[in-house]
């Protein structure tokens, strides 16, 4: 099985700071991968390079066999992205915003209704985004990332700001899509990673310190909990 995302010797330097350091990684269809790491580990930098917001200092990224540098439109067309903070046009109502995004992507108008239903936004569809709670704004961002039903989803803190019921709905929704997509979730919540991910990446100082299932990481670190394993792997270089 070929990788949907292939990263080869990827690095990103900001002056003397190595945010990502010679990182190689492959992600596959049918898996949910949780990306964990402390603040400053390089998680957001890595994701921003995959979606094309940042240019690597060195290395290559391939998305469904499209080189991101030489075929950026084809590569980015395979991705759905929920960035941290969900930047939105807050003066629009929910339906207007999602319809606008649908038109930008040259998708049929029915996509607007599909993602509103998917993200459980019917009750706020005609409400201005600026009046919504943080949790609802997050769900609007998630709905936008699902437009066109992309085969790869990159979700940066997808449950941030959600109440427990909304969080449960979001995680069930993400889990239900695992068979048909590659889903990469960046999160600070270890319990969330354990509950939904097939594979866990622990990142620190711009490098992947562990890559495997929950059980494999516990075995690698000789720890009895993910919390202990995370602490052991990320405190070693402090």
Image (spheres, rainbow, N blue to C red):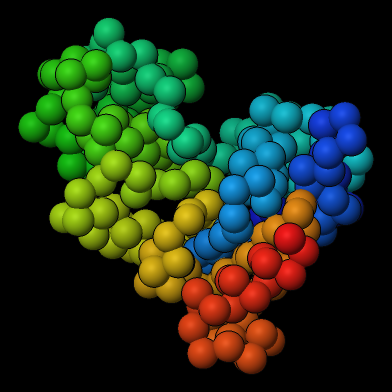
- Provide residue 155's location: percent of width, then percent of height: 48, 46
Direction from residue 42 to residue 153 in the image, left or right: left
Direction from residue 19 to residue 107 in the image, left or right: left
Q: Is residue 124 visible?
A: yes
Q: Is residue 74 visible?
A: no
Q: Is residue 178 above or below residue 17?
A: below
- Residue at the location (43% across, 23% down)? 87
Q: Quadrant of residue 138?
A: top left
Q: Tell me the quarter of the image containing the C terminus.
A: bottom right
Q: Tell me the quarter of the image containing the N terminus.
A: bottom right
- Residue at the location (12% across, 33% down)? 122
- Provide residue 42's location: percent of width, then percent of height: 69, 47
- Residue at the location (77% across, 36% down)? 68
- Residue at the location (50% across, 74% down)? 227
Q: Quadrant of residue 47?
A: top right
Pick the front one: 61 or 185: 185
């Amino acid at each position: 099985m070929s990788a949907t995302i292939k990263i080869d010797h990827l690095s990103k330097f900001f002056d003397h700071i190595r945010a990502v350091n010679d990182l190689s990684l492959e992600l596959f269809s049918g898996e949910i991968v949780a990306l964990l790491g402390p603040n400053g580990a390089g998680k957001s930098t890595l994701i921003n390079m995959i979606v094309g917001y940042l240019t690597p200092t060195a290395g290559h990224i391939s998305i469904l066999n499209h080189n991101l540098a030489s075929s950026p439109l084809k590569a980015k067309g395979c991705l759905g992205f929920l960035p941290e903070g969900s930047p939105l046009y807050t003066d629009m109502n929910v339906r207007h915003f999602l319809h606008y995004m649908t038109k930008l992507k040259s998708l049929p108008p029915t996509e607007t209704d599909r993602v509103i239903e998917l993200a459980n936004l019917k009750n706020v569809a005609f409400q201005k985004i600026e009046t919504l709670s943080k949790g609802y704004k997050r769900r609007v961002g998630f709905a936008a990332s699902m437009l066109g039903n992309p085969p790869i989803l990159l979700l940066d803190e997808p449950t941030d700001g959600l109440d427990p019921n909304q969080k449960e709905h979001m995680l069930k929704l993400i889990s239900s899509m695992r068979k048909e997509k590659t889903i990469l979730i960046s999160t600070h919540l270890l319990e969330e990673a354990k509950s939904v991910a097939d594979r866990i990446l622990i990142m620190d100082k711009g490098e992947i310190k562990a890559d495997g299932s929950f059980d494999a990481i516990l075995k690698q670190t000789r720890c009895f909990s993910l919390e202990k394993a995370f602490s052991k792997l990320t405190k070693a270089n402090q």
